[in-house]
Amino acid sequence: MRVLLFGKTGQLGWELERALLPLGPLTAYGPDEFDLTDLDTLRRVILENRPQVIVNASAYTAVDLAEKESDLARRINVLAPEGMAVVARELDAALVHYSTDYVFDGKKNAPYTEQDIPQPLNTYGQTKLEGEQAIAESGAAYFIFRTSWVYGNSPASFVNKVLEWGRQRETLKIVSDQMGSPTWARMLAQATVLALAQGARSPVSFIRARQGIYHLGGRGVVSRLELAQAILRLDPRSQEQIVHRVDAACTADFPTPAVRPLYTALDCGKFASTFRFSLPPWEQALTLALG
Ligand SMILES: NC(=O)c1ccc[n+]([C@@H]2O[C@H](COP(=O)([O-])OP(=O)(O)OC[C@H]3O[C@@H](n4cnc5c(N)ncnc54)[C@H](OP(=O)(O)O)[C@@H]3O)[C@@H](O)[C@H]2O)c1
């Protein structure tokens, strides 16, 4: 399987560049090679590589900044994946893309299925939804994996921030009214590879026969507060912590430019029944991630 990866320096992209290797020849690009908003270069790069599968781990993910930079967010989250999908269709290749739990408004209070109607509350979620729609309308074979609360090598991820705060502050205030499914980027990358490997003989027809949106996040539902408590408990350098109290707070206590949905756990049953496996419980993945 010839694979072309975009976004290799991101949390998920970094993991994918390693996890995808067993599938066959892999070419990976990041922002240092070219800017994805340059659609002509994007097209040329795909045509030169002639992949069977394009994996797009790139995205504009600055949720608050997106409220000010909506044009840029739209170019990266809508126009770039749309451009990938259009060239994929021309080449009879397939596109694997990732989307977000933030396409939902968080008012359901039960895990979201693929049948639930998206209703984004912020610009980031809106652009990710438009990206999904552009791919679905392109005619290319595609998988869109909607995931949630991704953590990996980025210092800005919630897991790394809590570890840092635990060494800097004696008390933490963490919101207890945001509920979701934490997802380790490495598990998401490995699940992508295991799913693609099932169609290794004929990847494009395999993807086309199953194309669509799949929810794919860590198993279980947890609040940000409970997640922070687990991170501090599992911290391999807990002797460096100075934190001795973690208090519950409300999302309303921390006003941010982007409104965040409160309940965004994902029901991943469709992925499990299609590919016959699922991601492990979030706490098991966190234990592995923290080592
Ligand atoms: N993080 C989460 O909590 C979360 C939750 C749900 C869904 N998701 C989705 O999961 C996927 C992976 O997320 P992630 O956390 O791995 O994201 P990430 O760490 O922010 O990585 C995004 C990558 O895209 C690159 N990129 C952004 N703009 C670009 C441009 N104009 N040209 C070239 N490259 C560009 C970034 O490069 P720079 O860093 O140099 O900008 C980075 O390498 C995304 O589709 C995201 O929407 C993430």
Image (spheres, rainbow, N blue to C red):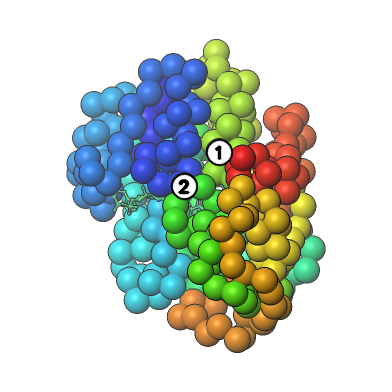
Q: Position of residue 236 (x, y in %)?
A: 61, 47
The residue closer to the viewer here, 34 or 173, is 173
Q: Mark 1 against mark 2, which lies toward the viewer? A: 2
Towards the viewer: 37 or 82: 37
Task: Work out which quarter of the rendered image holds the C terminus and state it.
Answer: top right
Q: Which of disc 2 and disc 1 is earlier in sequence?
A: 2
Q: Residues within 10 Å of mark 1 (few under 14, many from 20)?
A: many
Across and down, in percent, residue 217 comes to 66, 48
Dot 1: element: helix
Residue 256's label in the rendered image is none
Relative to 71, say whether 48 is above or below. Answer: above
69 relative to 164, above or below? below
User: Residue at 62% of width from left, 55% of height from top?
Assistant: 238
Per the rendering, the mark at residue 186 is: 1
Locate residue 66: give its quadrant.
Answer: bottom left
Q: What residue is drawn where x is 66% and y is 63%?
A: 228
Kind of residue at disc 1: Arg
Describe residue 41's horizontal placement relative to residue 241 as left or right: left
Q: Which residue is mark 2?
A: 153
Using the image as rendered, state which of residue 65 and residue 74 is in the foreground.
65
- Residue at point 48% right, 43% down? 12
Q: Vertically, is 179 above or below 250? A: above
Q: Position of residue 67 (x, y in %)?
A: 40, 75
- In the rendering, at what x and y percent does residue 197 appear? 58, 21
Helix, strand or loop at label 2? It is loop
| Residue under the point 55% across and 13% down | 201
Labels 1 & 2 near each other (Cβ < 8 A): no
Query: As shown in the figure, which amino acid type bears the numbered disc 2?
Result: Asn
Q: Nearer the viewer, residue 182 or 168?
A: 168
- Location of the N terminus by quadrant is top left
Q: Is residue 69 visible?
A: yes
Q: Is residue 283 above or below residue 88?
A: below
